[in-house]
Image: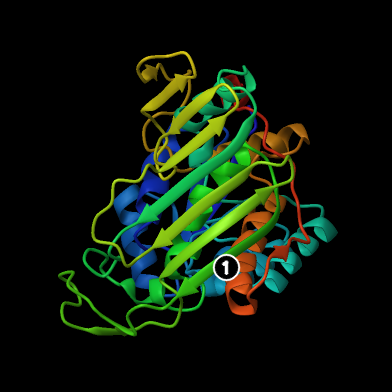
Amino acid sequence: MTVLKVGIIGCGNISKIYLENAPQFENFEINAVADLVLDRAIERAKEFDIEKAYTTDELLKDPEIDLVINLTIPAVHAQIAIKALENGKHVYGEKPLAVTKEDGKRMIDVAKEKGLYIGNAPDTFLGAGIQTCKKLIDDGTIGKPISATAAMMIPGHERWHPDPAFYYQTGGGPMFDMGPYYITALIALIGPVARVTGSAQLTYKERTITSKEKYGEKIKVEVPTQINSVLDFENGAVASMVMSFDTWHHQLPNIEIYGTEGTLSVPDPNTFGGPVFVKRHDDKEWREVELAEGYATNSRGLGVAEMVKAILSNSRSRVDGSLGYHVLDIMHGIHEASNEGKHQVLSSSCTQPETLRIESIKN
């Protein structure tokens, strides 16, 4: 079996779960890690018995590395990805694809020019929870989807994250931080989006960190932290979505999809598992649906494995950069709608990802 050699750039919080999960996937292995702070890369390499700890430039120049997992902060996603592509390496990046649409398009264009793959998180939609929901929709259990609701409403990350400032800078906020999970799940279940509208506000101009590492430090907030939006899908369905770092408590569902024959309760799209509930028009009670075979536990890295399988078989990846770019276009469109006071017709689209079967990764 062909195994691609992979390097991680960015050894912060999220790198740990990628390194923990990598051994469960058979078609790639992580051989190198790099970080702007070399000591951080050295520490991660020791922790996970990784062969090489590099500076970013050293990793990019290593001819043995086939693919880069880009786990840097959003502000440098595009810069690192383009450098990796120019050095002949496939790229899988954390969400969002980039901060600006211009950078996102450039990333896609460079990958195409170089004949390389570019993929993007989140890969949670490939997990058993949302894949079970996709199968229910495909089987007609709730009929044709006609509308949906989605809500991610929390007080903010300064209470727990060791270094939360970037969540409140350009490229952050609830839309760019958590929106990709919800929007990607909606695209996977309903399809691409045609136009959007929304209202956004910056509620608190300053936040105080209460996590241990930087307790008491102040954060200047640069981006909207309360965004209410409407998404019109190409197939005619309509969704309302709320993204908030300003909400203490709520009882809204993560995602519900309303069809001509019933309603589907979708699990948290920031997870890989369930529970999944459905209630058809003639059901008296909600019923929990057994998850389809697949990845139900935290399986970050699944998207890398799926993209590697596509590379090796010369086929379309379900995490293809065109999906990540469409999500980026949607998020910007919602902010632009708020700024301009009118609907935004999107210039992008994407292919709705095919259902993932476990053998798609295993074989």
Which residue appears at 42% of the width and 37% of the height?
299
In-image side of 360 versus 194 (left or right): left
Residue 282 in percent (x, y) is at 47, 13
Give x and y (percent) for residue 123. 52, 43
Instruction: Where is residue 303? Give x, y as percent.
Output: 55, 41
Classify the position of the N terminus by image quarter.
top right
Q: Residue at x 53, y 54 (%)?
A: 180
Please tell me how many numbered marks the rendered image carries: 1
Nearer to me, 39 or 178: 178
Quarter assignment of residue 155: bottom left
Q: Residue at x 62, y 56 (%)?
A: 327
Work out whether residue 134 can be spotted. Answer: yes
Vertical position of residue 125 compared to residue 207: above or below:
above
Q: Is mark 1 on a helix, strand or loop?
A: helix
Residue tagged by mark 1?
A: 77
The answer to whether residue 148 is left or right of residue 78 is left
Visible in this render: residue 66?
A: no
| Residue 251 picture location, percent across and down | 29, 46
Answer with left or right where residue 17 lies relative to residue 31. Answer: left
Which residue type does callout 1 highlight?
A: His
Of residues 38 and 72, the one drawn nearer to the viewer in this rendering: 72
The residue nearer to you, when weighing 337 against 212, is 337
Which residue is found at the position 41% from the left and 26% from the top? 276
